[in-house]
Amino acid sequence: MAKRIDVQDLDIFYGDFKAVEGVNLSVEPRSVTAFIGPSGCGKSTVLRTLNRMHEVIPGGRVQGKVLLDDEDLYAASMDPVVVRRTVGMVFQRPNPFPTMSIADNVAAGLRLNGVKDKKTLNEVVEKSLKGANLWNEVKDRLDKPGAGLSGGQQQRLCIARAIAVQPQVLLMDEPCSALDPISTLAIEDLIHELKDSFTVVIVTHNMQQAARVSDQTAFFNLKATGQPGHLIEIDDTKTIFNNPTEKATEDYISGRFG
Amino acid sequence: MSSTTARPEVTFGSKSSGRAIRNTVATVLVWAAFLIALIPLGWIMWTVLTKGLHVLFTGTWWQKDQSGALPPGFDHNVRGARHALVGTLEMSVVTSVIAIPIAIMTAIYLVEYGRGKVARLVSFMVDILSGIPSIVAALFIYAIWVTTFGLKLIPVCASIALAMLMIPVVTRSTEEMLKLVPNELREASYALGVPKWKTITRVVLPTSLSGIVTGALLGFARVAGETAPLILLAAYTQYLNENIFSGNMAALPTMISTEFSNIGDAVSSERLWGAACTLILLVLVINLLGRLVGRLAKVKK
């Protein structure tokens, strides 16, 4: 089910401003890749190009290629809506739909895409909530509003909602930055399990988190303020944290940055 | 640490007397402004209710129209306002049916799709439209309907003119409500592979529904009391007319203005204040209805 991602010579723009330049990287299927780097270096921007969410922002455009199992996501014939069904996303702040119940939130992706069969939807809701380790906490109140859950539960609800449409790849944009340590642990455990069926790419500011959850780590940085962001290096997480090739990476990881 | 910095001397613990005075003055001013604004409201309500409320309890008020009314001074029955109430309701409902879909779609365009020059132009047009005096809107419809097409005036002409007044009001209120929907919800929906139009109809609109409904009903209340287009386009009649596509049609505002010409007559005066009271009551009911709907459709917490 999971697919591999290849990014080739990717430049990302906001209007005329080049935000990220010359990114080349590969992500293996069923692995976890972490993007780390200082604020404003473009790691979230790169993540958002992987499911064409970047162009939702007015003026957002890219040059270069993003291949999903050799299919170019930015080919002229490619429908961004289909791309986003294949590459799911979890955001920094939990964002359940406020008008929908817990069950409806999970089923939203399918229902809004035309699935009406009650039985199928109920099965998907249960399976996805179990997949997000949330089922036991909410199974008795599936018809209650999703906004009534705690922050950590809401974020797992959003993960359940994202995996309910059975994507090939799951992108996570700092999914734990608004959560307490216990909820963070729950999400990290979940990422370990998700790896069995999805390709996961996660942006994080927490280097311990990158070290804990990822197989591969990419370090992004800015050359200078106002300059586009770069991918400095990408390697096995162990190598990046113990024996990085670039001095910039070592400085950032050991806290000697800037 | 040198003491050369221009830092104001502050004694720790004591409240500065200057600030306390300014606070008191501002508080008094704000309360005074509030009370002054309240006076006309209370006064209007008091006048209308004392003069008109008892008329509403006349047995015939809600059942009868003004048919059989004798010239002022010779008539001793208040009779009813059913014809005017029905007329106001029919014309306002038809106005809403025309205006609300256009207004909501304009607002959706402006918030969700509009970029660049066209959007700015549309937004500017809405501003212009909201500044058009109601009598000019009525004249415009008259010019089109009668002068250009040579048609006979029917009550629905008034509805069309009123719709021109209602569209900008509802567009602006809907726009504000749509802007309140967090962008994160739209992104969450896109990220699930939901197309934009479905995101708007199934996520954005339901989230802002209560506000949109409230705005639309306020617009309804606003046109229900509008008078000028009715005077020009829907001539007053003392008989009940339920067909909006023919003849003349009474409305509460035109009933008030008609009876006003004989305000010296006691019975006319009763009818006038009764109609005014009915109009205020109607607007009040619609407002309450709007709030109720708004509460029912409220975002679940």
Image (tube, rainbow, N blue to C red):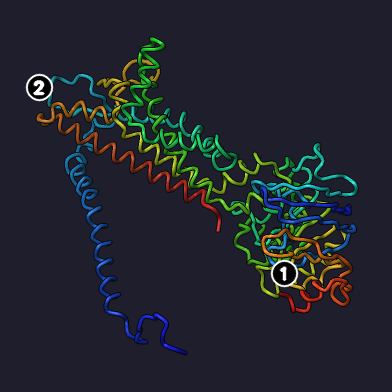
* Amino acid marked by disc 1: His
Q: Is residue A107 left or right of residue A232?
A: left
Residue A237 rendering spot, x and y as whole percentages: 86, 70
Q: Which residue is mark 1?
A: A205
Name which residue lies at 39% across and 32% down.
Answer: B165
A109 relative to B271, above or below? below
Q: Are marks 2 and 1 on the same chain?
A: no
The chain ID associated with circle 1 is: A
Name which residue lies at 78% across and 69% down.
Answer: A188
* Amino acid marked by disc 2: Phe
A40 or A180, nearer to the observer = A40
Location of the C terminus of chain B (image quadrant): bottom right
Q: Which residue is mark 2?
A: B74
Q: Is residue A123 visible?
A: no
Q: Nearer the viewer, mark 2 or mark 1?
A: 1
Residue neighbourhood size for the residue with mark 1, other residues' Cα within 10 Å, grouped as few (<14), some (14–19), many (≥20) = some
Name which residue lies at 47% across and 90% down.
Answer: B1
Residue neighbourhood size for the residue with mark 2, other residues' Cα within 10 Å, grouped as few (<14), some (14–19), many (≥20) = few
Residue B17, numbered circle? none
Judging from the image, what secondary structure is the residue with disc 1 in? loop
Judging from the image, what secondary structure is the residue with disc 2 in? loop
Q: Is residue B293 visible?
A: yes
Q: CA distance from mark 2 to mark 1?
A: 88 Å
Does the CB distance between marks 2 and 1 fall below 8 Å?
no
Residue B156 rendering spot, x and y as whole percentages: 39, 21
The chain ID associated with circle 2 is: B
Q: Is residue A48 left or right of residue A101?
A: right
A126 relative to B115, above or below? below
